[in-house]
């Protein structure tokens, strides 16, 4: 359930973009009726309506996620705050400047923040974030945790670069599809590949 909660903004972004792309006239009219006042020049370009509506929906959904957790008196994850800050800044830039390139940079900035946090916490702060996330499940040696942490840092750094390659060399429609299926698929595949060698270190959770 938490995975679905975490991916709701991304799923909504994809769904709204695809809907707007299939009915560009209606999407353009809706975007101009409700969001033209937030755009420089006061008019939404018909080619920008799908990405604008998708961006707005993501900002709203991420805000609702934070609000829901606050109402439930739950601690809001730091990464959710970071994600919201990035989507708010880069999403607002896409809306105001009527230009999709800003929102296309958003995943890369987020991935590079992940990579930087993993590198810096381990090398400078002597804190292994990967171990902190998985220590309740696995009892692996320090060398294994450090290697795993570096592998994830490199993965996110490369994924950030791959996002930019797709953003600049393929259509916006292709980039949106990559954002949901490509990047997510690669992340889950990398997770599985890294979990396999960890399985031998799984803690015994049998209460008996």
Image: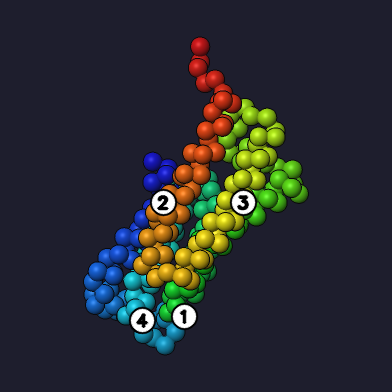
**Position of the N terminus by quadrant:** top left
* Residue 132 in the figure: left or right of residue 84: right
Image coords of residue 169 (percent x, y): 46, 70
The residue lying toward the viewer, choosing from 37 and 161, is: 161
* Residue 122 in view: yes
Q: Of helix, strand and loop, which one carries label 2?
A: helix
Indicate whether 41 appears above or below 106: below
Foreground disc of the pair 3, 1: 3
* Residue 136 in view: no
Reading the image, the residue beneath label 4 is 44
Pick whichever of labels 3 and 1 is earlier in the sequence. 1
Seen at 39% across and 70% down, the residue is: 171
Seen at 70% across and 35% down, the residue is: 143
Indicate whether 165 appears above or below 194: below
Q: Residues within 10 Å of mark 4 (few under 14, many from 20)?
A: many
Image coords of residue 7 (percent x, y): 41, 51
Reading the image, the residue beneath label 1 is 97
Pick whichever of labels 2 and 1 is earlier in the sequence. 2
Q: Residues within 10 Å of mark 3 (few under 14, many from 20)?
A: some
Q: Of helix, strand and loop, which one carries label 3?
A: helix
């Amino acid at each position: 359930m938490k995975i679905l909660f975490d991916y709701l903004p991304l799923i909504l972004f994809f769904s709204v973009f695809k809907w707007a792309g299939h009915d560009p006239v209606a999407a353009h009219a809706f975007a101009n009726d409700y969001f033209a006042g937030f755009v420089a020049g006061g008019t939404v370009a018909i080619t920008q309506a799908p990405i604008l509506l998708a961006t707005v929906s993501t900002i709203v959904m991420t805000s609702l996620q934070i609000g829901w957790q606050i109402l439930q008196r739950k601690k809001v994850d730091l990464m959710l705050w970071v994600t919201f800050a990035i989507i708010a800044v880069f999403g607002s830039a896409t809306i105001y400047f009527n230009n999709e390139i800003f929102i296309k940079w958003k995943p890369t900035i987020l991935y590079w923040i992940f990579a930087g946090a993993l590198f810096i916490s381990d090398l400078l702060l002597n804190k292994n974030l990967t171990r902190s996330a998985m220590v309740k499940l696995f009892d692996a040696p320090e060398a294994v945790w450090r290697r795993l942490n570096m592998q994830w840092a490199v993965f996110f750094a490369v994924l950030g670069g791959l996002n930019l390659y797709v953003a600049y060399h393929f259509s916006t429609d292709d980039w949106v599809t990559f954002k949901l299926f490509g990047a997510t698929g690669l992340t889950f595949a990398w997770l599985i590949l890294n979990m396999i060698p960890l399985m031998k270190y799984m803690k015994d959770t049998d209460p008996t």
